[in-house]
Amino acid sequence: MALSFHAFTQEDSTENDYQKEFDNFLNASQQEFDNFKSKNDSIFYQFLLDNWKEYELLLDEPRTTPKPKEQPKIDARDANLIKEIKPKIKTKTIRENTDQQIQLQLPPKEYKSMGHAATYSTVSFYGSDIDVPIVNTQSLPTEAELNQKQIANFFRENADNTELIAAVYHIKEQAIAKNLNAWGYLRLLQEASVVYFKKQNDRVLFTWLALLKTNYDAIVGYSDNDIFLLVHFDVPAYYISNFEKDGKRYYITPLPGQTDRQKPIVSYEGEYPESLKPVSLHISDNPLLAADQKTREIHYKDQTIPINYNQNMVDFYNNYPACELAIYFPPPLSQLALESLNIYFDPVLRGKTKTEKASILLDFVQTGFPYRTDEQQFGKENYLFAEESIFNEFSDCEDRSVLLAQLIEYFTDLNTIGLVFPGHVSLAVAIPEEIEGTYINYNGSHYYICDPTYIGSKLGMMMPEFEKIQAEIIDF
């Protein structure tokens, strides 16, 4: 089986001398490229030998306001408070496409021209089998005491291994075929590391080297005799040990089974002398994972509705770093979930207007999914992707908003936005006709409040305590 590679647009060049030099050498001869690669790797090797220091680790948590322990319900007095108002927009958080799914990249000529791999191994990635070419590698020495020279030598020996780097590009192609984003690619590298190395520290260093060679911003550090991978994300992450270096946050990203570290960590000060980009946590679509069908029963209007979900997708998202709420809105439900929802909703929604459909979906999420705060369920704030809300027995306001947004988009094609208040998250939907109720005039449309937590509320009905509070908009 031959290794294949596709070309993709070169990343925008930075202003540093290394990147300018790299752009020039891309069009030069094979020997010139070899010389340049050696120069960059040699410079970095010297950094690894000489420039290390200790960093104190931090642990960030999302800013939260206590949520109601019981799901709020509308009463007769609330209906009289409904009127057309225009809440002020505090902040607009329109999320741009910043490498949400992995971009194809031009491999250097020497990796592109690699022939056939002798043998392949198979790794399991959330139920999917991934072929990984087997190549020779250089492990850390077996001395008991870990030091920076060993890490530097690991980099030098393996960075010069053209077959190994070609294998990394092959793994990246497999990630693209599975529709993984940059985080998913990192996780696939971690799984593939078992093919090349037996020891945990070697696997960490392989993942680091592979990320650097495919232009992702990653570093390593060590504490006692354990090496840790740290990556720079494109959004803040929570509950993950991290430190700041050169104005950027680097988060410990452990191998499966490797624990996070609270002790200070020793890492190098220099940067890899090529243009690197953060590991993106943005995700525009679901990964293409094998289907592992599980079923949950929803009790709604005296009926029991079976809804299927993909356990492999739930597991993928369950391992996702906790991060900004805006990241959780875009990924849709799995085909398994949508097909089972269609069985119930197709006859129920047939012949209805889009506004009527949205009202039915609103009532479904309000009353079909038991409410419990994250503090009650998990002991901390824990946002859920839509597929996770199908899997989990309970959900709170932001989880229900994410789920309802996906249901409305799928069954009505109406646009929605998230609304973030202190201690509450709601949804607003762009209704095509004028109705009585609370709305936000946004991008030329009236987005009416559509609160999946406020039991009994209709489109346009808003909890009275939030009517005069500025909302942050999440536009996804």
Image (cartoon, grey):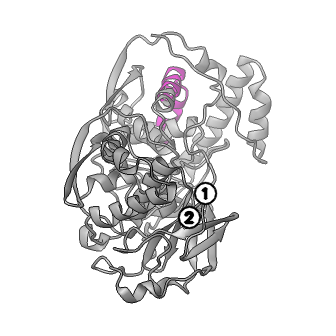
Query: Tag 1: residue type?
Result: Arg
Q: Position of residue 283 (x, y in %)?
A: 51, 47
Q: Quadrant of residue 346?
A: top left
Stretch in magenta: 152-171
Q: Position of residue 337 (x, y in %)?
A: 33, 43
Q: Nearer the viewer, residue 228 or 450?
A: 450
**Nearer the observer, disc 2 or disc 1?**
2
Q: Position of residue 107 (x, y in %)?
A: 62, 26
User: Which of the numbered marks, if any, corresponds to residue 474?
Assistant: 2
* Residue count near mark 1 (Cα–Cα under 10 Å), binned few <14, some 14–19, many ≥20: few
Mark closest to the chain's N terminus, 2 or 1: 1
Q: What residue is rendered at 32% in x and 56% in y? A: 389
Q: Nearer the viewer, residue 19 or 290?
A: 290
Q: What residue is rendered at 58% in x and 62% in y? A: 430
Q: Nearer the viewer, residue 469 or 315?
A: 469
Q: Quadrant of residue 200?
A: top left
User: Does the stretch in magenta take in 160?
Assistant: yes
Q: Are marks 2 and 1 in contact (CB under 8 Å)?
A: yes
Residue labelled with disc 1: 95
Q: Is residue 332 left or right of residue 4?
A: left
Vertical side of 425 occupied by 332: above or below = above
- The image quadrant where one finds the N terminus is top left
* Residue count near mark 2 (Cα–Cα under 10 Å), binned few <14, some 14–19, many ≥20: many
Q: Quadrant of residue 260?
A: bottom left
The answer, for residue 390, to whether it is visible in the render is yes
The secondary structure that dominates the magenta segment is helix
Q: What residue is rendered at 54% in x and 17% in y? A: 4
